[in-house]
Image (spheres, coloured by chain):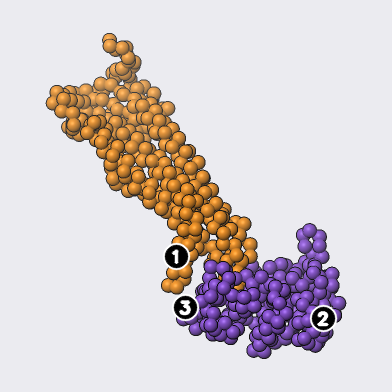
Chain colours: A orange, B purple
């Protein structure tokens, strides 16, 4: 108990003595960790959107009405035999309709005017490699036909098949955008994290310099290196954990004041929830601990010798 | 208690501080190490604290071969050694009590031990009335007493004193020497580096004289020169 008391007191004194520098370190840690969390949330948001648009389905094979069960099994077997196909699932008209209603639940203008009958059943195909899409129209004997209104459509002669739609390029484009955005933010976050490390290391070093007499005496009377270092390590940890805490709070604020406002405006867009922010929090805290440990190692390197 | 065998210390800048020094000091001895500035007195003390490594030769302290002592055990070695310096090395923002208590606190001694031993040792060095005085409220001699109390509070086997009277007037120096003698009488081995001739001559203790890093004299009950 006495030991904790000692560490706590030493840490508190250190933070007080270094007030402004400690504050600078803390706010840098805060901004860095906030951006780090933001990058993760942006990625999460895009994942949600992509999933909602495509259900991660890369290729849809739309079927002609009426759908015959033996045609469906036959087609599924045919598709699954292709090396390009990872798996195939069948979506009935009813399921497709339900999904349509769920997607546009806030836009009755769509749901009221489109009858379920107009929505086709489909086979949803996941590809082993998006580059292999061409195998599917070949297997189903489809050919490109110019449409009167412009654009092209794959029209298939395979019985029961209406058309084949390739979403894989859309999917990969969306994924690429997500990746670029979150890598961009992550890059800024990493630069900021590096400055947070440098600033915290600097406060520790200044603290050690200010207390070099005490440290010298501690060495002389036989205090262990850990005894000397732990208060400084805790100081760095407190600074970066406070930054992490502020970052999490701020992410919640952003979520409540910006994202939640959008909920009324953009209706068929899925938006991140509190649970998504909460899921990011442990990662931010882990990052802040890493920052503190690295800062401690760098900041005290020169003082490690006995 | 202390044994140096053919110890040579050459600093990285090429200065030879000690050259082939062999010295044996028994438990309970009081030894003066004398010599002009730069003769290697401080280097000798630094070797015993393992603040420096010998370039050649072996150093033993309390039965331990310091050359082979691992770095992480050094703090435990130092808990058996008290150190006193010319500049006292007291913390200005702590009282006498707190300065002495600090030495026990940082090696993890419990509060009840601190509360018992610190007043005891301050009483022993003659500062029983000045527990709550800050260093700037104390005379030089009193400050050196606090530093001796701090060096002795953990009951060390060896007390190393580097010019402990260097900043004190002759009569205060005599008081400090009486105190060190008292510490020696309870069994603590005392090694004191000094060039205070009057004190060495008055005490008539063993004298080891260094000159340019070599032992030029080792005399029981000796005088300064």
Helix, strand or loop at mark 3: helix
- Pick whichever, A26 or A40, lies toward us: A26
Q: Is residue B104 left or right of residue B203?
A: left
In what element is the residue under mark 2?
A: loop
Neighbor class of circle 1 (other Cα within 10 Å; few <14, some 14-19, many 20+) is some
Q: Is residue A199 above or below residue A66?
A: below
The residue labelled by disc 2 is: B224
* Rendered image: mark on residue A8: 1
- From what the image shows, is residue A129 above or below residue A1? above
Tell me what residue is drawn at x 57 percent, y 69 percent.
B91
Chain for disc number 2:
B
Residue at horizontal 28%, vertical 41%?
A: A256
Q: Disc 3 and disc 2: Cα gap in Å?
A: 44 Å
Circle 1: element type: helix
Q: Position of residue A76 (x, y in %)?
A: 29, 31
Are tags 1 and 3 found on a single chain?
no
Of badges 3 and 2, the one in the foreground is 2
Quarter that holds the N terminus of chain A: bottom left
| Residue A175 versus residue B85 in the image, above or below | above
Is A243 in front, or is A35?
A: A243
- Tell which of B204 and B140 is nearer to you: B140
**Same subunit under labels 3 and 2?**
yes
Q: Position of residue A64 (x, y in %)?
A: 21, 23
Q: Residue furthest bottom?
A: B185
Q: Between marks 1 and 3, how big is the CA–CA gap?
A: 16 Å
Q: Which residue is mark 3?
A: B111
Residue B109 percent coordinates (x, y): 51, 77
Q: Residues within 10 Å of mark 3 (few under 14, many from 20)?
A: few
């Amino acid at each position: 108990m006495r030991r904790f008391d000692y560490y706590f007191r030493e840490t508190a004194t250190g933070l007080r003595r270094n007030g402004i520098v400690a504050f600078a370190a803390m706010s840098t840690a805060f901004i860095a960790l906030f951006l780090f969390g933001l990058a993760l949330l942006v990625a999460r948001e895009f994942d949600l959107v992509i999933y909602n648009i495509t259900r991660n389905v890369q290729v849809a094979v739309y079927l002609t009405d009426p759908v015959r069960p033996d045609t469906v099994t036959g087609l599924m077997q045919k598709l699954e035999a292709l090396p390009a196909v990872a798996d195939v699932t069948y979506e009935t008209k009813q399921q497709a309709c339900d999904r349509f209603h769920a997607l546009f639940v806030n836009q009755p203008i769509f749901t009221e005017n489109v009858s379920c009958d107009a929505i086709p059943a489909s086979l949803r195909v996941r590809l082993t490699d998006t580059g292999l899409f061409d195998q599917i129209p070949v297997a189903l004997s489809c050919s490109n036909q110019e449409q009167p209104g412009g654009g092209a459509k794959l029209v298939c002669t395979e019985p029961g098949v209406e058309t084949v739609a390739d979403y894989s390029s859309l999917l990969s484009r969306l994924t690429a955008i997500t990746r670029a955005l979150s890598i961009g933010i992550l890059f800024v976050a990493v630069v900021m994290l590096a400055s947070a490390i440098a600033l915290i290391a600097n406060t520790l070093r200044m603290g050690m310099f200010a207390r070099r007499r005490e440290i010298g005496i501690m060495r002389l009377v036989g205090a262990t290196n850990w005894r000397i270092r732990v208060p400084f390590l805790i100081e760095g940890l407190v600074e970066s954990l406070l930054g992490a805490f502020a970052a999490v709070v701020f992410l919640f604020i952003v979520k409540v004041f910006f994202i939640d406002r959008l909920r009324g405006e953009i209706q068929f867009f899925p938006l991140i929830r509190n649970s998504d922010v909460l899921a990011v929090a442990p990662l931010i805290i882990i990052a802040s601990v890493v920052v503190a440990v690295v800062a401690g190692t760098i900041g005290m390197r020169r003082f490690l010798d006995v | 208690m202390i044994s140096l065998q053919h110890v040579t210390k050459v600093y990285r800048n090429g200065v030879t501080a000690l050259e082939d020094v062999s010295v044996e000091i028994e438990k309970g001895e009081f030894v003066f190490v004398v010599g002009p500035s730069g003769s290697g007195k401080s280097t000798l003390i630094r070797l015993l604290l393992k603040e420096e490594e010998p370039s050649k030769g072996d150093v033993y302290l309390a039965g331990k071969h310091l050359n082979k002592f691992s770095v992480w055990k050094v703090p435990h070695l130092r808990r058996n050694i008290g150190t006193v310096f010319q500049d006292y090395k007291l913390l200005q923002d702590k009282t006498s009590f707190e300065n002495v208590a600090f030495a026990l606190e940082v090696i993890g001694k419990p509060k009840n031990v601190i509360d018992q031993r610190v007043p005891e040792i301050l009483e022993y060095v003659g500062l029983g009335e000045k527990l709550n005085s800050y260093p700037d409220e104390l005379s030089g001699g009193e400050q050196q007493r606090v530093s001796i109390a701090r060096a002795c509070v953990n009951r060390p086997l060896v007390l190393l004193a580097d010019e402990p009277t260097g900043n004190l007037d002759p009569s205060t120096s005599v008081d400090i020497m009486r105190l060190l003698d008292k510490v020696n009488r309870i069994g603590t081995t005392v090694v004191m580096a000094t060039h205070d001739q009057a004190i060495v001559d008055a005490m008539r203790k063993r004298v080891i004289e260094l000159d340019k890093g070599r032992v030029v004299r080792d005399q029981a009950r000796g005088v300064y020169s």
